[in-house]
Amino acid sequence: MADGHPEAGLMPSGQVAGLIDDLPTCAELITRFGTQAQKATYVPRLVSGEAIAGAFALSEPHCGSDAAALKTSAERRLDSWVLNGSKQWITSGAYAGVMVVWARTSGGGRGISAFIVEGKHPGLHVGKPEDKMGLRGSNTVALTFEDCAIPLDNLLGQEGDGFKLAMIALDGGRIGIASQACGVTRAALEASIRYARDRRAFDRRIADFQAIQWFLANIATDLSAAELLTLRAASLKEAGAPFTREASMAKLLASEMAYRACDKAVQIHGGYGYIDEFPVERYLRDARVQTLYEGTSEIQRLVIAREVIKAHSA
Ligand SMILES: Cc1cc2nc3c(=O)[nH]c(=O)nc-3n(C[C@H](O)[C@H](O)[C@H](O)COP(=O)(O)OP(=O)(O)OC[C@H]3O[C@@H](n4cnc5c(N)ncnc54)[C@H](O)[C@@H]3O)c2cc1C
């Protein structure tokens, strides 16, 4: 995880390393769609910690929301798939022992397939870590594939099924981001309550001012709503029921709520909220990305709208 920054490895409460990196997503994809041999080879490495991270390599420099426009290619040769192209924004890409990489192939579906690639594979080059506004405890890099030859057996699922696999993985990942958003909001709320009880102004605790109480009440209420939506999506997933709409709703609501809440947490801290002596400025920076990755808020709204319209026309 660590990228050398002082914030590396320090997660606000409720955030765990597994949610910041894509280890669970990789392990789940391989468990669900892998061959027996792929499961036996890669899943134990991921879950035992032998591979200290997993990576999910879908986005490219020219496309994130429109993932189907990806250009990285995989050419089938006699005894290997040869990957060429660039990936952008890959979480834990520098440390991942196992990656799932999406590339364009000739046939089937949308012409996109998924592949398992081991970290440090010849032909795979890792870019320098991005200097991000927040989430600085997590490593984000570009990856370049230059005639990167991987075994034929490393195709994940059927050729042409890649886009479908990516969408399935993102549905689950969105529950993870919603959980992250709830975690950072809980941390911001707890820090704000502590501060409001300690800090005095006009001979009173600031917790006694109604303005501050309303900030706290709104954060606590929004957080409860986001947690319930997140749990609903997670329980549908666990029950094997459809959860695309609920995962997008949870991610949309929780991520937008987290940024608002962390902004109010800074407000409650006054000037001290703006310096790194208190944790809330970091929470605000960390929360900002949550409306961007695993699908922006705009993409979540597209998914939700598509699902609700479909449900009404059924
Ligand atoms: C810190 C970080 C970590 C990341 N980790 C990973 C990772 O591990 N693996 C990975 O594959 N990717 C990762 N990403 C990439 C992330 O998923 C993309 O940044 C995201 O999907 C948005 O894509 P984009 O940046 O290309 O924006 P664009 O797709 O170019 O979007 C730009 C703007 O246009 C809007 N927009 C685009 N299309 C539409 C539309 N149809 N309707 C309305 N609005 C639209 C977007 O909502 C956004 O506001 C990460 C990104 C960050 C910042």
Image (cartoon, rainbow, N blue to C red):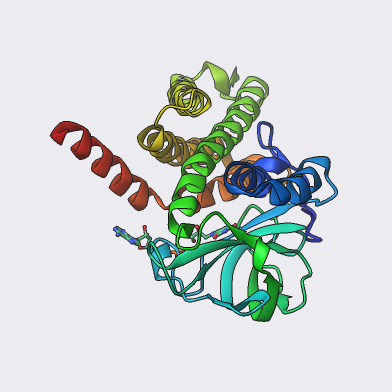
Left or right: 181 in relation to 107 = right
Left or right: 14 in relation to 314 = right
- Give the quarter of the figure containing the C terminus: top left
Q: Point out the quarter of the image occupied by ligand 1.
A: bottom left
Left or right: 120 in relation to 212 = right
**Is 294 or 288 nearer to us in this picture?**
294
Compared with 271, 154 (above or below) is below
Compared with 136, 87 (above or below) is below
Examine the rendering and report whether any part of residue 163 can be seen.
yes
Tell me the quarter of the picture where residue 10 sits: top right
Compared with 63, 296 (above or below) is above
Q: Position of residue 206 (x, y in %)?
A: 56, 23
Q: Residue furthest left?
A: 313
Examine the rendering and report whether any part of residue 292 can be seen.
no
Q: Residue furthest bottom?
A: 147
**Is 153 or 88 nearer to us in this picture?**
153
**Is 219 or 182 nearer to us in this picture?**
182
Residue plotted at (45% across, 48% down): 291
Residue plotted at (49% across, 47% down): 170
Q: Position of residue 8 (x, y in %)?
A: 77, 52
Residue plotted at (64% across, 79% down): 78
Q: Position of residue 40 (x, y in %)?
A: 76, 46
